[in-house]
Structures are given as C-alpha cells and as structure tokens.
Amino acid sequence: MRFSTASSTIRSMIRITKKVFTDLAIYMIGFGVVIGVVFPLFLLAVGVDPALALAPWFFILCVAAGIVVGLINILLARGIVGSRIEELVMRMRYISSHLMNDKHEDIVNNCNPEECLVKVDSQDVLGESASTYNLLVQSLFSSIKSELLVREFTSMLSLRLELEDLALSVLPTLLATTAAESGAIIMERDGELFLVATHRVNNPENLLKNDVLVEAMKTRKRRLLDLPEGIVVTSALLDYVPRQVCIEPLLYHDIALGAVVLAAAKPFSENSLHFLDLVNASLAVAFRNSLTYDQLQQLAANDSLTGMYNRRFGMARLQEEYGRALRSGSPIGLCLFDLDHFKRVNDTYGHPLGDKVLAHVSKLIRGVLREGDVALRYGGEEFLIVLPGASLTDAFQIGDRIRRVVEETIFQHGSQNLNLTISGGTSSWPDYDASSADALVRKADEALYQAKESGRNRIIAL
C-alpha cells in the first residue's frame, strides 16, 4: 500500500514536457543545482571558514558539481532503466507487427526467446515487469496455438464425411494434441455401442461393456480416472499402465452420440483438457453428419427387406471385386441361389409370411459367409454371393453349406412348420475364363438352371 501511494505521488509530480526522461533530467539537474547552492551553507554550519565557503568561485564549483551529478544520474537512468524499457518496447513492436499483419502462425512457430521474450535480470519492479510481460507473451502464444489447432482441426473435420475415415483422421490428432498414448472412438447407434477407431488398446471390444464409459455417456460429463481408481478399468485394456484416463462424451444438442477415450502415462494438462472443450462441439457435429451419411448410404445400398445389398449397389461391388481379381490374378467365385417353390409360400400363406421367409433366409446366408464376402438380393427370391479369392471348389463348398443350413432350418408359422430348400449355381474365374463380371454371373445362372432342372435342393458348379 505504501509503495502504491509513493508511486502515485511520484507520478502526480508536475509534468514539464511530454517525455518522462526529459522531465527526469530537468528534475535531476535542478536538484543538483539546489544541492550546489545549499552545500556551501552546510559547510558554514559545520565550521568551515566563511571566506572559503562563501567565495563565488566555490559557489560556482558546487553548482557545477551538482549539475554534473544530475547529468551522470540521468545517463545512468537512461542506461540502466531506459535500456530495459526500450528492450521491452522493441519486443512489443516486434510481436505487434506480426499480429497486425495476420502472421499468427509465423510468430508462434518461429519466435525464439531472444526475439520475443525479455531477460529478467533484477528483483525489483523492472524485473517484475519483464517477468509479467514474458508470462503475457507465453499466454498469448498458447492462446494462438490453441486457436490455430482448433482451426486446423475443424478444417480437417469438414473434409471427411465417411464415419471410419473421419475417426481414423481424428484419433491420431487427438492423441498428439493431448499427449495421450492410446485411445478409442466409440459411437452409439440404435442403442448399441460400437467401435469406430482404436490405437494401442488390447481387446477394444471390452471397452463397450465398461460401466464407467456407460455412466459418462449417461451423465454427459467428462470422467478423469486416476490410478489407483482407474487401474481396474484400464489394466486389462491397455498394453501399459496409464496415470490417467479421460472419457470425453461427444454431445450433440445435449445428447451423447458417443465418446472419445484417451489414456496417458501422465495426467492430462489443463491445455489438453481445454482443447477437448474447444473441439467437442465441432467433433459432435462432424460425427453426427457422418452417422447420418452412413445411414443414408446404407439405405441407398441395402435392400430394405433382407438387409443385403440391393442389386444396383451389389453389382457395382461385383465389378470392383472382379476388377481387383483381374489385377491381382487371384480367383473370384460366385454363388447364385433361388428358393425352391417359393411361389407356393406366397400363394398359400400370403406375401407377409413370404417376406419374413426371405428376411430369415438372408440372415442364414450371411451367417455362413466369410468376412469380405459380398451378398446381394439379385431379384425376387434370388440371392447372389460374391466370394473374393474363392476357386470353383471353394464356391461350391460354401454354396452347399448354405444349402444345408436352409434345408435344416424349420420355419414356424403359427402351429405349422415349413421346410424350405434352396438351389444354387456356382462359377469362378479363372476356372471359367469369363470375359466380364456379367459373363461370370451368366455362367452361375446357367448352373442354377441345371440345379432346378435336375431336382432342386442342390448346388451345381460350372
């Protein structure tokens, strides 16, 4: 309080010019003149010979000495205080010029301590000013970095629409920005959680059953798990022991679409958590758009009754797989199926039951297929299966396995049990040197015709 009062008194002294150091020079020289005049009188008080103390030449020397002392003081003030203030001003101008010219990224990435910060070499108000300035610059740079990161992150989000592509781009950025070692992105659809992307997570499907994750999504609040509380949650999931796990629900209109799970070997910094706060809304919007796009894609590509690809999209996938087989030289097999006497089911029990039968048969077929196989509803009660890498023998075996599954399944309708069978024809490239994917389908259709003509409930390979 005393320091503040003294400072206010000094600042309120009469200003002579518009320059502080000029005023200071006038005051110091004036004070030196006063001391020069008073000094001879002081000598008289201590018993010095009046002839000497009051001699004009002695007066002149004392005043001159006072002026010299004043000049020396102002030079010292300019050198010691002024140089530090000038350095501070120079740094301010350097940073201000870059900010005014919209060179935020340049100043943040290229500014070194010698150019942007001031050396703190005293433990007084000057040192405190320098230290406070440095903290201000560092806070400014941190804020600019956060702004640039958010801008870059948001721009990246706008370039990706497909769900998996978006998640695979987002997760590495989140890991790098928050200094996390592992993580996962989890979404919810129709009340079910599913993984979209993971990094360094053992048995990631176990995350979907995690009570803490479910609770965080229900409460729509971030959870930070510190050891030892988090060790039960994480030890079986990660290939290292983290210090902290962050579960960040992604909120869209206050609804949890999913969550980002991050684990780090040390506690998350305030800057990392602040970054998550800044990008949460943008992330939620991006994933909401991706989920909607994914749903529209499925609606456009899938047959609404069977859940298989529709003919248009499925034939496009066949063309892709056929082209890939030609380029790689690997085989590709086809199975074309038709439900035996399906018209009787529609005529006897009605089309609603017929639709249920088609949906159930399609489920049975998908249960037999391998990962990477493509199933489509070819038309009516016909199904086409694309088997990348399958020879004619492989295609026949898969087709016959499907035939047996359908034959062994009992379809219940009230108190009645329905037994259905299926016939199929298979073809394969290069076993059959088809000139096109359509030619390969025609070969499978020819085999199916033979299966129908030879008694049904069988698979024919051509």
Image: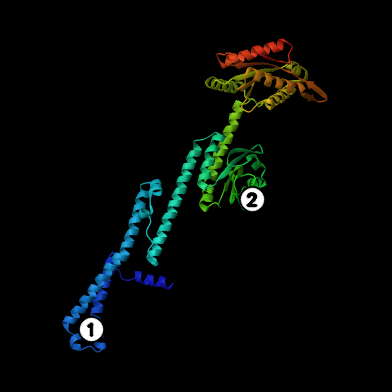
Residue 200 or residue 218, whichever sits in front: 200
Percent of width and height locating residue 404: 74, 21
Instruction: State the SS at label 1.
Output: helix
Taking depth in this image into account, of 65 and 296 the one nearest to the observer is 65
Foreground of the two, 235 or 403: 235
Of badges 1 and 2, the one in the foreground is: 2
Query: Where is mark 2, residue-wise?
Result: 231
Q: Is residue 154 above or below residue 323?
A: below
The image quadrant that residue 67 belongs to is: bottom left
Q: Residue 77, percent across and down?
A: 30, 67
Sequence order check, earlier mark of 1 and 2: 1
> Dot 2 lies on which element?
helix
Percent coordinates x, y for residue 51 in the rendering: 18, 88
Horizontal and vertical percent position of residue 101: 35, 47
Q: How many marks?
A: 2
Q: Is residue 267 above or below residue 443?
A: below
Dot label at residue 110: none
Residue 40 image label = 1
Q: Is residue 74 above or below residue 164?
A: below
Q: Is residue 38 above or below residue 278?
A: below
Residue appearing at x 56%, y 50% in the figure:
265
- Examine the image and state in which quarter residue 207 appears: top right
Query: Spatial distance from mark 1 to mark 2, Cα to Cα?
Result: 84 Å
Residue neighbourhood size for the residue with mark 2, other residues' Cα within 10 Å, grouped as few (<14), some (14–19), many (≥20): some
Amino acid at the residue labelled 2: Ile
Which of the colour schemes (rainbow, by chain, secondary structure, one colour) is used? rainbow
- The C terminus: image quadrant: top right
Q: Which of the 4 image quarters holds residue 117? A: bottom left
Three-letter residue code for mark 1: Pro
Q: Residues within 10 Å of mark 1 (few under 14, many from 20)?
A: many
- Foreground residue among 98 and 113: 113
